[in-house]
Image (cartoon, rainbow, N blue to C red):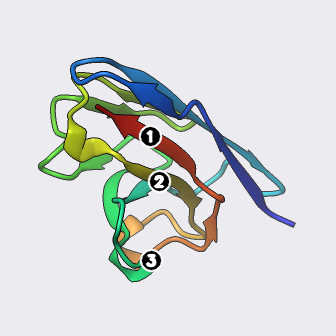
Amino acid sequence: HVQLVESGGGSVQAGGSLRLSCKVSGHSRGSNCVGWYRLPPGRAPAEREGVTAIDSIGSTSYADSVKGRFTISRDNLQMNSLKSEDTGLYYCATSLTDNWLRGFDYWGQGTQVTVS
């Protein structure tokens, strides 16, 4: 039974930083990807947007809106220079394959990030 639990969310002023963590259990740390998505306030669940992903060898991908500010590792998401538009519910996800383009298979419940 795969479980993902996010932590580290909270409220911060614009320009501040937060570090989100994703604890994965029941799933091998082998050839798979970890990704972060976010759901901005007032949006439908289907509008969840990809933020960043990392594969098993450390290759990464970032949305243009967060490049240079966010840094992903296999366990954490470091978010610096936060902006109000970064506000949202942040989800951690992991996949069964080592290719994030094939999507993510397991999801956490999300952690709220609010930037004011």
- Residue contact at pointers 2 and 1, CB within 8 angstroms: yes
Residue at image coords 58%, 60%: 94
What amino acid is labelled 3 in the image? Pro
Q: Which residue is mark 2?
A: 89
Q: Mark 2 vs mark 1: which is more N-terminal?
A: 2
Q: Residue furthest left?
A: 64
Q: Is residue 81 above or below residue 83?
A: above
The local secondary structure at tag 1 comes to: strand
What amino acid is labelled 2 in the image? Leu
Residue 87 picture location, percent across and down: 33, 45
Residue at image coords 36%, 60%: 41
**The N terminus - image quarter:** bottom right
Label 3, label 1: how many angstroms apart (C-alpha)?
Answer: 16 Å
Q: Which residue is mark 1?
A: 113
In the image: residue 83, left or right of residue 43 = left
Mark 2 surroundings: few (<14), some (14-19) or many (≥20) residues within 10 A: some
Label 2, label 1: how many angstroms apart (C-alpha)?
Answer: 6 Å
Of residues 56 and 80, the one nearer the viewer is 80
The local secondary structure at tag 2 comes to: strand
Of residues 37 and 29, the one nearer the viewer is 37
What amino acid is labelled 1 in the image? Val
Label drawn at residue 45 = 3
